Image (cartoon, coloured by chain):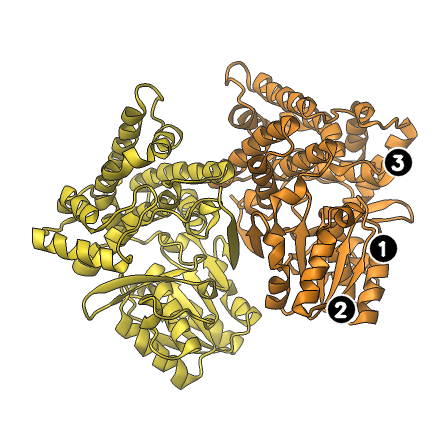
Chain colours: A yellow, B orange
Amino acid sequence: MFAFKYFTPTKVVFGRDTEKQVADLIREFGGTKVLIHYGGGSVVRSGLLKRVTDALDAAGIAYVTLGGAVPNPRLSLVYEGIELCKREGVDFLLGVGGGSAVDSAKAIGYGVYNGGDVWDFYDYKRKAEGCLPLGVIMTIAATGSEMSDSSVITKEDGLIKRGYSSDFGRPKFAIMNPELTMTLPDYQTACGCTDILMHTMERYFTNGGNMEITDAIAEGLMRTVMANAEILVKDPKDYDARAEVMWAGSLSHNGLTGCGNDGGDWMTHKLEHELGALYDVAHGAGLAAIWGSWARYVYKNCLPRFKRFAVNVMGVEPAGSDEDIALKGIEALEAFFRRIHMPTNLRELGVNATDEDLVTMAHKCAVGVGGAKGSARLLNEADMLAIFRASV
Amino acid sequence: MFAFKYFTPTKVVFGRDTEKQVADLIREFGGTKVLIHYGGGSVVRSGLLKRVTDALDAAGIAYVTLGGAVPNPRLSLVYEGIELCKREGVDFLLGVGGGSAVDSAKAIGYGVYNGGDVWDFYDYKRKAEGCLPLGVIMTIAATGSEMSDSSVITKEDGLIKRGYSSDFGRPKFAIMNPELTMTLPDYQTACGCTDILMHTMERYFTNGGNMEITDAIAEGLMRTVMANAEILVKDPKDYDARAEVMWAGSLSHNGLTGCGNDGGDWMTHKLEHELGALYDVAHGAGLAAIWGSWARYVYKNCLPRFKRFAVNVMGVEPAGSDEDIALKGIEALEAFFRRIHMPTNLRELGVNATDEDLVTMAHKCAVGVGGAKGSARLLNEADMLAIFRASV
């Protein structure tokens, strides 16, 4: 067991119609001039953006808007947002949408508060000393960015996708109405469930230390996400299932499921970041496509955890050798991915990667993590390439 | 499933030697003149108080001290603390000890910030509009006060024990070093485990709504607390078991295990408050002594939850009628209480209550809750008396 810090200051307001509280919440946290930052047209088409601006108008809170945050959100839009905030004297950010809008808003917040080139943070050159306060209205359950300290931005020049984590970036409030997630395409819903699951799995497959209470919470969360992901395949309008997945998304990535461990493995995420940067695939689908190859490559180095996962999460009978049980757990999770129509390799992901692409991605990944990384198994560039090749 | 708010802003610093960070944390949250509020002599005898004052001296942070917070902390000491803070210009509170010191510090914080008679809050006459910022160093795992919004104070005049809850009272930081809990007498350790368990059970035994993810987390937490409470009976110095129980104590009462429910039942706590006020018993022991009688009185009105508890938490075989299964779960928890040397009735608690005492306690309890309360089963004064009588 390792020492840990736990800091989740975000005020969560969860349930139907909670977006009506947006003006009160902005005021509670001192916002007087707001940048509403959102993604594509769905927030406009659904009428949510208008309801938000109407609420701010009624409350007399000034705002400007900036749409266009895309999946794998781009650095150029972040720069644009920073300039807009400075020009307009914005003192509060409101991200409306999914993880992309929120991650992009976090980056804008770092840029405005700290000055200089915001990419420095994502390039590990500086640490943020603060962030413009940020609130969010979530319309996608996936990244957990609404309570997390992390954001991921893609730099167009060189297609470099990097994450930066700082407690300063944790949102002040998160408005979470499960109904707002109901219009999401089924594929995106499944991608979100996969991402949520993976945020806890990255913390779960570790060596060197764990807490029983953290494991118990993590296992309960993973079982809940999978059960409700399957419900949503059949009935995307099931409010309770939407709510279970949405709350799991926040808890999965706010730190709770990692308390007492060594920080987590995170290599599936790092490998996926290269897929996302190069092929612009949906993050959750990319994770599903790479996970099985990662798991088969590393499970012998982390056998007690893979065995426990198989039994406690996937319901595998604890009979046979530890390796057999572990492999059955991996197979069971891949079968789950197929049931929610997620890919389990690059081909199913729709990516026809050349071997040269795989070499490039492995190299960029190794550079991005500073050579080698991983807790379940420490992976260097050759290992990364082997996993990419196994995933084709 | 109900809508909910979730707000746990406390920065937790968990692990060995974390008390060394106290000066940095006070400074981080703006404290310049501190009231160190603690309980009995154990904090002095263990040297912890000296280490804290040495750390503040070294950091150049001014402070005054006030000891004497007792279990079932007293209003008179709260008044004394408020006057001391005003006289000395204190702008930050540091509670050192268990829930009593922290609850007492919260009350002092409400009194200093809001003015007027602080008992008004506990007497449901006013709501606090703020609280002096508060940090804590925990030496007992029990009340969860280090992350919770609640505090419980006893007014000597009439022996009235009341709780007040407000987000303003949530500590800014909580320093949690499991080693500091190792010198606690075994009886107090078991009392703490019981209190922790009960904080989640109060939220678990409800009618009308629940979330699967909350249940899964709650069940994992309860199993973890029980398993580690039994380890501590045999080996009170087991660091990992101390850590599991300590972290469970925070999570049990910070709101996490109630997300999506109707607010919880809380009648075992309300009934125990009368025991605590009249006989000054240890809170956890009082809860254990009353719970079985409460459970047998209400379980038919909340059968699905009692059945689920029996199977998922107590490991009862799901065979036979639902009532049989539920009763076996109640019996199993009482057996657990006996294994950790907790009482299961008033006699074992060491309380020889006259029937007049029971009538008085039931009446005070009914007045305290405004007539009737309870989610598993709504209890009025006659019900409360019946439970007290069954618990003798």
* x then y, percent, for residue A259: 48, 46
Residue where numbered disc 1 is placed: B77
* x then y, percent, for residue B213: 47, 40
* Number of other residues with Cα within 10 Å of mark 2, as a class: few under 14, some 14 to 19, many 20 or more: many
* Number of other residues with Cα within 10 Å of mark 1, as a class: few under 14, some 14 to 19, many 20 or more: some
Q: Is residue A10 above or below residue B384?
A: below
* Number of other residues with Cα within 10 Å of mark 3, as a class: few under 14, some 14 to 19, many 20 or more: some
Q: Chain of mark 2?
A: B
Give the residue type at disc 2: Val
Q: Secondary structure at mark 2?
A: loop
Q: Chain of mark 3?
A: B
Q: Nearer the viewer, mark 2 or mark 1?
A: 2
* x then y, percent, for residue B390: 78, 23
User: In the image, which disc is placed on residue B90?
Assistant: 2
A298 or A370, nearer to the observer: A370
Residue where numbered disc 3 is placed: B360
Query: Which image quadrant for residue A360?
Result: bottom left
* x then y, percent, for residue A145: 40, 58
Q: Residue at x 61, y 27 (%)?
A: B230
Q: Is residue B155 visible?
A: yes
